[in-house]
Amino acid sequence: MPPATDDTVAALDELRREVESCTRCPLHATRTRAVFGEGDYGAELMFVGEAPGYHEDQQGRPFVGAAGKLLEELLASIGLTRQQVFIANVLKSRPPNNRDPRPEEIDACQPYLWRQIELIRPKVICTLGNHATKLLSRDQTGITRVHGKPRAMEISGVPLYLFPIFHPAAALYTPAMLATLKEDMARLPELLAYARGERPGAGAEEPGAGGEQPGAEPGRAGAGGERPAWRPAAAAPAAGQTPAADTLFAGAGAARPDDGSAWGPDPSQPSEPDTTDAGSEQLGLF
């Protein structure tokens, strides 16, 4: 990925100054420091969380507490550092007592996030938890149903793949969720390769090939066929290796990155209960 141009750097630095002096919502009166985000201004991969917490508010940096340490460990597991990605939040100011963001606060901050996406132009945005996922996907389906399922999107004129995962803060307290989070993160190298246009070589089946019939609903196989979905990769592909298409897509309800279809449960399959509990849903992490 080429480095950000001087114009991009200058525009993002100007946006940072605007965020740091922002008074668009009442949170400016209670914050210690605004948290613009940090990382590579030319990153292919962007992470978007909910809002700054206590440590982020004190330091003016995103994900610097225990959740941030876990995120760094997860990045290391796929050969990346936080300096190679860009990390931001839906809100740039901490809500008092870490309460949920309010609609008017999200509305006030949303233009900043959209402008960051427009300037950085990531190929993949990994949303962390419910609030970020619902905002960027424009879909109210809970994170327990959509985590690990890529979706083709266009945000601020930027074509990209949205890839929701559980919030690291939630996984810190739930071992099963941590295991799922690690599995989802392990899929990112393949998705990034696919987003770069590194399609499978000759002999490998392209996503959607061989199963769909003319006139079939996007993302769904023809009569008698099964829709492929994203499957976890055993390991990141070696340098120069192109990921096979059949390792990328598996499971009812997943949207293939090439079709942009909704990622909700497949209407042709038995419905799956949403396991989100009311308390965790309010946190915006699950």
Image: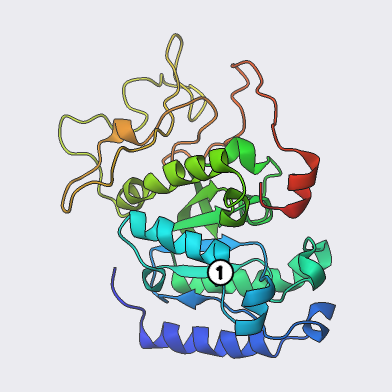
User: Left or right of 130: which side holds 100?
Assistant: right
Q: Residue at x 80, y 63 (%)?
A: 99
> In the figure, 60 relative to 212: above or below?
below
User: Left or right of 102: which side holds 250?
Assistant: left
* Image colouring: rainbow
Residue 14, position as x, y percentages in the image: 55, 90
| Quarter of the figure with the N terminus | bottom left
SS at badge 1: loop
> In the figure, 93 relative to 69: above or below?
below
Residue 249, position as x, y percentages in the image: 39, 33
Question: What amino acid is at disc 1?
Answer: Phe
> In the figure, 214 relative to 118: above or below?
above
Q: Quadrant of residue 63?
A: bottom right
According to the picture, the residue beneath numbered tag 1 turns out to be: 63
Q: Nearer the viewer, residue 214 or 234?
A: 234
User: Left or right of 66: which side holds 140?
Assistant: right
The reply to whether residue 149 is visible in this rendering is no
Q: Nearer the viewer, residue 25 or 178?
A: 178
Local packing at callout 1 (Cα closer than 10 Å; few below 14, some 14-19, many 20+) is: many
Q: Residue at x 36, y 82 (%)?
A: 5
Q: Residue at x 78, y 50 (%)?
A: 282
